[in-house]
Image (cartoon, helix red, strand yellow):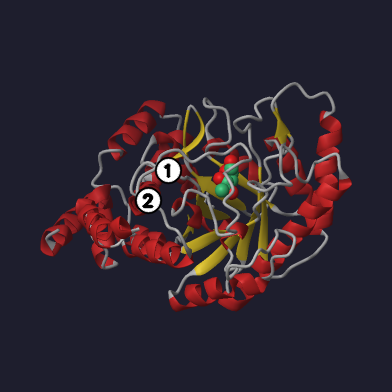
Amino acid sequence: MNTERVKKAYDEAVARYAEFGVDAAGALDALQQISLSLHCWQTDDVSGFENTGGQLTGGIQATGNYPGKARNIDEVKSDLEKAASLIPGRHRVSLHAVYGDFGGQKVDRNQIEPKHFQSWIDWAKDNGMKLDFNNTSFSHPKSGDMTLAHRDQSIRDFWIEHIIRCRRIADEMGRQLGSKACHNLWVHDGSKDITVDRYLYRKNLKESLDKIFAVKLPNVKDAAECKLFGTGLESFTVGSHEFYMGYAMQNGIMATLDMGHFHPTEETYDKISSLLLYMPEILLHVSRPVRWDSDHVVILNDSVQLLAQEIVRAGALSRTNIGLDYFDASINRIGAYVIGSRATQKALLQALLEPIELLRKYEANGQTFERLALLEEAKALPWSAVYDYFCEKNSVPSAEEYIKEIQLYEKTTLSGR
Ligand code: RNT
Ligand code: ZN
C-alpha cells in the first residue's frame, strides 16, 4: 500500500482516538510487545517427522489435501519463516515432540532428548525467535484411547516418561534461548461410549501428572489443556475443564484454554477473570471451532474479539500466553498462519484501542444505555488504519498485500513439492 496514505490515515486515526482519551501510539507499543506462539503443526497437518507413516489419531483430524504440505524439517522452517515475514512483530514457535530432528533414526517417544531439538534451538536463535513445546501422545501404537489414564501401568509409565522428557526438552529450549518455554500437556484420554469407572481413570491421570510434575524445571512454564470431547471419544474425556482447573490450582501450573474445547454456546473469554484469581498465568490456544473442535483458521470473529477484550480489560496481557492452534489442510498453509495471526493481533489492537476509561465510568454510574452505545460506536473507530500503520512500521505488507506474497511463495516454492 502507499506508505504516505497509510501514515495519513494513521494520523487521522490517532486524532480520532484521542477524542476518547485513547492513546493509539501507546496501543501500538503494547501490541509490539505481544508475541504469539505460532504452532508448527499447521505446516504439515500435524504429521511430524517420526517417519512411521502413521495416521493422525487421538480424536483430532486435519481435513483437506491442499498441495504444498511441508515434507521435512527444512520445509517447515522455510514455511514458518515465510509466515513470520508477513506477520508484524516478534513471535514464538511452538513445536510438538514428533517434530524432532531424528536424522532418519527411529526414536520412540520414551527416548527423545534435547539433542533431537538442538537444530530447532539453533534455528530459533538465528531467527530471533523463542520456542514453546508440546508432548505428542496421539498417533502412536501405544496411545489408543488412553495414555496417562490407562488401566495398564506399563502404558501409563511409557507416557509419563515421554512427558518428563518433553518437559526437559522445553527446559533446554528455555535455557538456551533465554526465555522460559511453555510446555503444554495435552492427552486425548477418553472413551466413545458410556464409561462407569470415571473416578478410576481420573485418579490414574492425577497420579500420572503428580509423577510428571514432581520433576522441577526452572526454564519451563507448565500448562495442561482440557477438552470437552474428541471425535470417536464423545462420551467421556478424562481431562475435563474441572479436572485440570482443580489440578492446575492445586499444583501451581497454568490452565490452557483452547477456544475449540468448550460447548458451542460457551465463550472462552469468560473463564479468564476467574482463572487468573487463582493461578498466576494461563495459556491460550486461539482457534475457531465450527460445530465441533474442528480447528478452522482463526478469523476476526466475536469469540476472538471477546477474548482479546477480556485480557486487555483485566490488565492480564503479561499473565496470558497466547498460542495458536488450528490445522486446516484445505487452503494454503502459510496463508493460514498469516490470516490467523493477523486476526489475533487485530483483535488485540481493537481491545487496546477501546475507550475503556469512559466505558468504565458509564458502567460505574449505571449508565447502561451509554455503555452499550459506546461499545457499538467503538466497533467503527478506525482501528484498521492503526493496524496498517503497525504493519508498515514493522516492514511487513499492510492490508491485503500479503495475498500476492503468498501467491508468489506458492508459485516459486510450494508448487515444487
Ligand atoms: C487437541 C488439542 C491440542 C492439539 C495440538 C496438536 O484437541 O487442542 O492442543 O491441537 O496439540
Ligand atoms: Zn489446543
- Judge from the rendering whether residue 259 lies leftward or rightward of residue 282; answer left or right: left
Q: Which residue is mark 2?
A: 333
Pinpoint residue 416: horizontal percent, then vertical percent.
30, 59
Q: Nearer the viewer, residue 381 or 348?
A: 348
Residue 391: numbered disc: none
- Specify whether 271 is left or right of 387: right
Number of numbered markers: 2
Q: Is residue 5 left or right of residue 333?
A: left
Residue sitting nearer the eye, 259 or 236 = 236
User: How many angstroms separate mark 1 from mark 2 (CA)?
Assistant: 7 Å
Q: Residues within 10 Å of mark 1 (few under 14, many from 20)?
A: many
Q: Residue at (69%, 69%) from the top-left corner?
A: 113
- Amino acid marked by disc 2: Arg
Secondary structure beneath dot 2 equals helix
The residue tagged 1 is 328
Query: Is label 1 in contact with label 2 (beta carbons under 8 Å)?
Result: yes
